[in-house]
Image: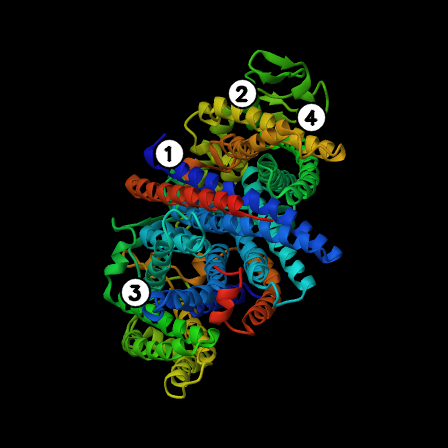
Amino acid sequence: MNELLFLSRFQFALTACYHWLFVPLTLGLGIVMSVMETLYVRSGDDFWKRTAQFWQKLFGINFAVGVATGIILEFEFGTNWSNYSWFVGDIFGAPLAIEGILAFFMESTFIALMFFGWGKISRKAHCTSTWLTVIGATISAWWILVANSWMQNPVGMEFNPATVRNEMLDFFAVAFSHTAIIKFAHTVLSGWMTGAAFVVAVSSWYLLRGRNLEMAKRSIKVAAIVGLIGSLGCMGAGDASGVDIARTQPMKLAAAEGLQKGSCEAPFSIVPGVEIPHMLSFLATHDFNGFVPGIEDITRLGYTSHQSEEVLSGEAKIAEGRLALEAFKRYRQLRQSDPEGAAQALADFNAHKAYFGYGYLENADALVPNVPIVYWSFRIMIAMGSFVVLIFLLALWLDYKKRLESSRLFHYGALLALPCVYLAGQCGWIVAEVGRQPWAIQGLLPVNAGLSSLAPTNVLATTLIFAVIFTALLAAEIRIMTRAIKDHQA
Amino acid sequence: MTYAFLQEYWWFLVSLLAGLFVFLTFVQGANTLIFSIGNTEAEREMVVNSTGRKWELTFTTLVTFGGAFFASFPLFYSTSFGGAYWVWMLILFSFVLQAVAYEFQSKPGNLFGTATYRRFLLLNGVCGPLLVGVAVGTFFHGAEFVVNHDAMGDGLVISTWTGAAHGLEAVLEPWNLVLGFAVVTLSRVLGALYLQNNINDDALQERLRRAVFANALPFLVFFIAFAVHLLTAAGWAVDAQGTVTMVPYKYLQNFLDMPLVLLLFLLGVVGVLAGIFLSVVKKTRCGIWPAGAGTTLTVLSLFLIAGWNSTCYYPSLTNAQSSLHLANSCSSEFTLYAMTLVSVLIPFVLAYIVWAWRSLDVPGITRQEMSQTEHKY
């Protein structure tokens, strides 16, 4: 891999991973604190006001770093991925602009009212502002996930060789694609799990210390309910995502399972050597005998999909892609000087354009992402996520049994759930993003053709600056957060 | 709606966002005054909390400006951001530091101390407007790049920067710097005017009034110098065939060809001067409103003469035919149309921002509030 490509990918991964440390807590804690403030408005009980304000304080500390890390990502598409910005900017830019107009202003306006509006606006208006802050954050997530989903499953557009870019044909196909809906549900609800796990963990710490007992117990109850709803939705969306990926990104699924050869009885690998027969077939197709292609089918052999479509091998697609690329170059050379030649070149291009992006790949091996990373990330995500679900269930059970305060084992488990939920979230994105390599846009544009024209030292320098700044800010955030938790007297 | 209309409409929206952003840099300007205006901790705290209730609007406007530019003129995004790399990156770094500085500066356990975070605010207050001014200067003075769509056939980059400094060279162009300093001093004027309006404190009022005056003088020098330079400068025009040529007095010609835009410019300048006058001479506290509206109109009109009337808004100094104008850099007609439908929601967004702003500002910030409330930075 060339140096510029490696550094550009590394920088994007670094900034995205940092951003995703803060965003899920915003989404989840936002719901929990909004529910608490609603309880205050409905009951008039000052206990809920103080409790909501405490969680809002922690929300604010986290929110600031989320905003700071987010702005980088938006501009990085231009700074480090110049070709990408033009090649798909006609589709990709719109969700970002709409996100700014519809979501960011909502978040930034109402968060100011949430923090500084106590006593200045009515209780109901304040509670509405709190909800609108988290709704704004969630709408923001919608549009950025629309953009990301379009990269995973590009729909509603067509390549225009005259402008050398993909152009949008159907806004609704982009904005409400099946992939976007699933990804939104899976991602946002995983954020609910994160926020809920955070509240349960912090509250359990208070219970362990014998402090703020009433606030801790009642917070755990609210958070566990939000967390459980999030977990169920997240699992449902995860299941739908499996079927969607099997259809749109079969290589990602094959890599996530380390599946070399396809089969109609594909087993699900729990860890290497331990398998559940037929399970992968079922998860991918909802049919215990559905065909799931393996890495070799996708790269060299070709296959017939579960939907009975003949799928070319990667090698054949690359050959087609090269023909498309050659015709495209010919068209660009002749379009001014030789209209007839250009028309022929265009006809040749159209005959092969479905595989245009494959023309940029060296060979079929380039189609295979890093299998161990994707395989293990997937398993860690599931294991960690399952543990967190168990903690939510346990919390509700202990609350029902009135043993929430006394069960120290649960308190330690809840503390452990906090790093677990973050690890699950990070691993989820690693599966999604490493798993789709080498594509920036699935099937359309590999990452090596999307770069900016920069000397690698520029990207190295900014990466180092980002790493230092973000790490320092993360350290400060954790310290401020722990101090605020420690000092709180309910 | 024709394709040409949609292009001009989106250039108008991008220009309006730019105008609003420069107005909202009163946050940055006021932050450069934290240490010079605030003699005591209570005074510095009032300044930080006053801008602290608005900083997210400035930040969000910057992000939306980026998003709207990307969506409507993606070739600019891929050319300028990937080319003038360091200017944009430095702007981003300064805004990243600003974003956390408010929330962290007074919190126990913040690792680096209150003064460090306030220096981040100061750094952003100077570097943000300066570099934004420099970046916008390249809209008039051009930059060294080439656009070649055929490069995609070989997997090469379409927009390439021909200078190795990747944007830093723009900082060395004197007229870009003049514009940069004009924006810095303007933001300080606006900052002082905003604080006058927002903080109810007698001790600060007089110092803020002096700050308005002290910054208005260099601002006027930089601004007048830049305006004279711009109106006498040549610009790059594009004809119906897409051929780019240099035209003497292009920006002056644009004003004359578009008298409404000239009117906006003149109204804007009068607004800024009126704001300064109201503060310095009339000793009132409402100068931010005419100055803010004036800033928005002035910047809007400058952007409009940069992009409308068949003008190249991002001229290439390496190859004039690579210059960016509305028609060769915009999104497809369908995308512009779809986004235009979404843009009808903008007045609704503006309405709730105004409501929120009024709700928070009605009593104004006082020493008493700062010493009593928990809800502060």
Q: Which residue is mark 3?
A: B141
Task: Give the SS element for disc 3.
Answer: helix
Q: CA distance from mark 2 to mark 4?
A: 17 Å
Q: Amino acid at mark 1?
A: Phe
Q: Which residue is mark 4?
A: A285
Q: Residue A313, position in %: x, y? A: 54, 23
Residues at badges 3 and 4 in contact (C-beta under 8 Å)? no
Q: Is residue A327 above or below residue B135?
A: above
Q: Which residue is mark 2?
A: A295
Would you say A60 lies left or right of A231 here? Answer: left
Upstream in the sequence, badge 1 or badge 2? 1
Q: CA distance from mark 1 to mark 4?
A: 35 Å
Mark 3: few/some/many CA within 10 Å (<14, 14-19, 20+)? many
Q: Amino acid at mark 2?
A: Ile
Q: Is residue A437 above or below residue B259?
A: above
**Residue at mark 1: chain:** A
Residue at the image position 63 percent from the left and 60 percent from the top: A129
